[in-house]
Amino acid sequence: MIGGGHAGTEAAVAAARRGARTVLLTTSLETIGQLSCNPAMGGIAKGTVIREIDALGGVMGRATDLATLQFRMLNRGKGPAVWAPRAQADRGLYRRAVRALLEAQPLLTTVQGSASRLLTGPDGRVCGVETADGRQLLARAVVITTGTFLRGRIHIGTSNSVSGGRAGEAATTTLAEQFGELGIHTERFKTGTPPRIDGRSVDLARLERQDSEIERFDFSWSAFWDRPRREAGRTRHPEQLPCFITFVEQGAKDVVQRRLEESAMYGGAIGTRGPRYCPSIEDKIVRFPDAERHQLYLEPEGHDTQEMYVNGLSTSLPVDAQLELLHAVPGLEHAVMTRPGYAIEYDYVPPTQLWPSLELRTVPGLFLAGQINGTTGYEEAGGQGVVAGLNAAARALELDTVAFGRDRSYIGVLVDDLVTRGVDEPYRLFTSRSEFRLTVRQDNAIPRLYALGESLGLYTEGERRLAERRLRDEAEARVLAETTSVTPEAALPVLDACGESPLSHAVPLFEIAKRQKVALRDLFDATGVGTTLSLDAVTTADLEIKYAGYLARERAAAARLQRLGTLALPQDLAYDRLINVSVEARQKLAARCPATLAEAASIPGVSPADLQNLAFELGRW
Ligand SMILES: Cc1cc2nc3c(=O)[nH]c(=O)nc-3n(C[C@H](O)[C@H](O)[C@H](O)COP(=O)(O)OP(=O)(O)OC[C@H]3O[C@@H](n4cnc5c(N)ncnc54)[C@H](O)[C@@H]3O)c2cc1C
């Protein structure tokens, strides 16, 4: 594995768990698991990916649990099927936890060094790596996970541009040059990061404070599976820290507008595309001129530092303009900037050149994972790392490759989108990218993936025991829900607490659990059953009961969409009038005018949900 970021670490652990002797080669052992940008893990769709990685034995969930400073369950208002766990991490703790987990992994060795050249055999197959200091590491398969380092160029303003893979770290250039020799096509993307500030210089008392949610959450099975749910409040997390909210208002907007031409992105220094969903403050102000204000979160970087991350203020303005901008934000009038924000441009490999195993179609034995494949985000990188690691091990050990279906995981959606549709801007996961988003949830990663992990031999004996207990707990919860009745008296406090009407006679628990607001675990408590079952297992059983009808419809809709693939689309279709289709999809459909629904499906940015709505609107038309 080349690279100790999020793709590389997961790839290394996955390959070693699959049984391959694995070396992780990275430029610095100290930066293994480094969070390059926001110290936050999870969120919409991404939280589910962390749980999928964890279900397959990966490190991201375990390290997050050891480093969580603040936790929130996003989408709570929308029902548990789309809940999205998100944790703020202590940057230093996270890095150290990842490194310790890697060093505890049998068959895996971490080595410091910079890969400068791939070794290839006479048949064109990759057979190892040469480092910048002249060492040769021979391997039957190589995974490259160099993130933003490939010919990286850092920009701060229009006149400050230096070669670099991340602030203070050298870019990787010789590998990039060799890609050309091997016939691997590359293109360029950009991304950016906000300035950091000294928390002591912020007037925190004037800002809205956001505390961690009371209910704690563990991403990893290893944390909660062996604990009865009554003890689930206990946690391994360090002490929780608050975030603070402030806004970019008129004063700060004026600064950006006045100095826009000096921004690397707007002054012509960078012409490439960046992540649509993590726009810079310059982008936000240009694209949404009528927005009164833009929210910023001040997030603590860790227990051992006063530094804060200014989430929402990504910028490539010159340093003095960044300081002027910070000082125009309420509460930051006297802020000390500890590091300026910057934009970075880098090479990526358009991922349609890859097999679904993430092996390059034209270079046997060479796999790519992470930001190098045109994605953005730690979780997207980690998910690809698992796929590339398992398949590189399979290549080395002459085993079967592993495929992840779209209907079984977000990792499957991610890889399928990348290799079949490609990317035209940095790719990020969303729930809307999956046509199975009720089936593929954060709570049920183990039921979805354990059989696969077990068939690949990924688990230790202890983990196997925990997983099987989790599955047994879920089955038992379902049986208890069907076979236990609750009396009107016992159900009254539960129903009262969520504003539901009382019962007139005793009914089986699963009948009441169908009501959206009533939690099965509260019904178990009211009837004194299932108290030793794991909370996660009870949640899954609960959601399977609540969403049984929707789940059946989701599968039927997916089958219908497959049949509709050949449906012809009128060439004069007024896409801008299809209000149920997302704005992004409308723009992209109007630009391409696809001939069929299947062709529309191949356009990056047109999600399965957009296709369903397009088919529906066509029907009405
Ligand atoms: C400035 C910046 C801003 C970002 N902003 C966002 C954002 O807003 N939203 C978001 O979701 N994501 C953002 N990201 C992206 C996020 O950091 C990445 O998506 C994620 O880290 C990618 O993981 P990776 O494993 O592919 O690469 P990285 O995490 O970048 O890891 C690459 C690893 O490869 C190693 N390496 C590089 N070259 C060599 C070599 N030749 N030999 C050996 N090792 C090598 C590096 O040392 C590093 O350990 C940003 C990244 C940067 C740098």
Image (cartoon, rainbow, N blue to C red):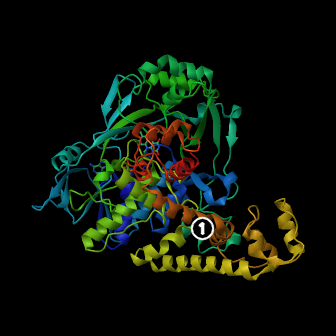
Q: Residue at x 51, y 19 (%)?
A: 257
Residue 74: percent from left, percent from top: 63, 51
Residue position for label 1? 552
SS class, disc 1: helix
Judge left or right: residue 138 versus residue 312: left
Of the pair 345 and 235, the residue shown nearer to us: 345
Judge left or right: residue 54 versus residue 515: left
Q: Say few, some or many: other residues with alpha carbon within 10 Å of mark 1 (under 14 / 14 to 19 / 20 or more).
A: few
Task: Determine whether 505 is above or below 81 in the image.
Answer: below
Looking at the image, the residue that sits furthest to the top is 258
Judge left or right: residue 435 versus residue 10: right
Of the pair 477 and 421, the residue shown nearer to us: 421
Q: Residue 328 lies in what quarter of the image?
A: top right
Let me know if residue 365 appears in the view: yes
Label 1 is placed on what type of residue? Ala
Q: Residue at x 51, y 61 (%)?
A: 560
Residue 152: percent from left, percent from top: 31, 39
Mark 1 residue CB less than 8 A from any atom of ligand 1: no
Of the pair 100 and 523, the residue shown nearer to us: 523
Residue 171: percent from left, percent from top: 29, 41
Q: Residue at x 19, y 43 (%)?
A: 177
